Amino acid sequence: MKKWQPNKLVKLFPALALTFGVLAPMPASATIIEECFDDRCTMIFGFSGQTETFTFPSGVSDIRFEVLGAQGGKTGGGGGRVTGNFVDVPSTIYITVGGAGVSSSFGPGGFNGGGASGGNAGVEGSGGGASDIRTGFSLSSRIVVAGGGGGRGSGAGSGGGAGGGLVGASGKDGQGTGGTGGSQVAGGIGGIPYGQGSSGGDGDWAVGGAGGSGPVHGGGGGGGGYFGGGGGGPDEDTCCTDAGGGGGGSSYTDSAFVTNVVHTQGIRAGAGQIIISYRVAVESPPAEESVAPPAEESVAPPAEESAAPPAEESAAPPAEESAAPPAEESAAPPAEESVSPTPSEPQQVSSQPEPTQQPIQEPLPIASVVGPEPTQEPNSPAVVETVVDEPAVVGFTAITAVPE
């Protein structure tokens, strides 16, 4: 598999919209970082100010997540963190990264649930937004949530509560009290003002409470979360510790989708972040190479070798060896070896061609047979020419076959 360079920045542009279905126009600052090493890929989602969709490649496994909420304004409480593994998740999920709180009077809370800051000093911190993963677009489909931190109060100001955990941390008390953190069943309670001014707002489901407002210093806003933190109480004077901080938002996970969950409070500074990693399926080359060769080698050769050769070898040779040789060996030799020295009467030969004539031979001291004689029938006389040891001219006698 191809290895991507670490921290490769992939900016979202129209070509990537096929994979990441953006539900609204995306700010130019939105980024996704993709890191792939061997068979594992990691997707890092930064703050974009909207909910995005992500579709997993086919065949992925061992899906892990790390979700971090945003920090509260005016260096308020840090965002919470949630880590774990997915055990059952749809092929497409919805990603929402929380925005950090701001530092101003009546400033808006961070994106995704942060509570607004109070007034009127101009330096109150708003609550940080939560980060979450959903199975759909609505808040009711959230399956993992990391709470945002509470904003710091105005003046000398008390710090905002840390976001995250099953119950978010409460904001610090000043002269006005800090708001409490959100839990798994309810939002945090708003802080009480010191002197004149309004109390901090209570947190609610997915939303932090607004900071209280007074003649001088306002309270910090509550952090967003599964349930948001309460807003801090204001302070009517310029003495002492001034306004209270906002409470942190709570984190949450749905056990039907995740396992091995770990919660951590107040760990994230700035905007939130979501990290998803998974193991990708790797194709196996050996499966393609082991099919074709066996099929080609086992068909053609046997058919050619087993047909023609046996038919040619078993026909002609036996016929030639069993016919001619016996006929040649059984005719001539017996005729030459059957001569008898004893005088006998001429014989009659049946079905035999005219005998071959022999030339005149020199006189011999002993009796000899003139020419070969044909095969005799039993009890038939044969004619034999006997030569006497006298000087004479020897003639030859022709033997003529007598018909029966």
Image (cartoon, rainbow, N blue to C red):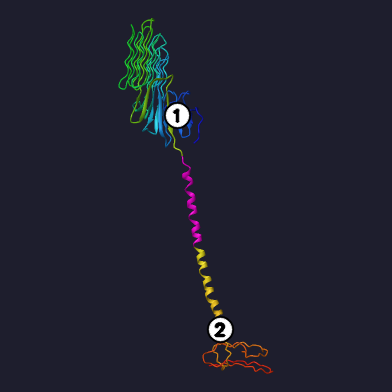
Image quarter for residue 355?
bottom right
Q: Which residue is mark 2?
A: 334
User: 54 left or right of 378?
Assistant: left
Q: Residue furthest left?
A: 185
Given the image, on which type of amino acid does mark 1 rest? Met
Residue drawn 56% across and 79% down? 329
Per the model, the C-alpha gap separating discs 2 and 1 is 110 Å
Image quarter for residue 191?
top left
Residue drawn 49% across and 53% down? 296
Given the image, on which type of amino acid does mark 2 rest? Pro
Work out whether residue 330 or residue 97 is closer to the camera in this orientation and state it: 330
Work out whether residue 215 or residue 69 is closer to the camera in this orientation and state it: 69
User: 214 left or right of 314?
Assistant: left
How many C-alpha atoms fall within 10 Å of the one at disc 1: few (<14), some, or many (≥20)? Answer: some
Query: x, y (%) of residue 202?
Result: 32, 16
Vertical placement of residue 346 versus 268, above or below: below
Question: Is-magenta flag for residue 300?
Answer: yes
Q: Mark 2 or 1 closer to N-term? A: 1
Work out whether residue 296 or residue 318 is closer to the camera in this orientation and state it: 318
Helix, strand or loop: magenta stretch: helix
Magenta segment, which residues? 283-306
Q: Which mark is residue 43?
A: 1
Residue drawn 53% across and 76% down? 323
Question: Is-magenta flag for residue 4?
Answer: no
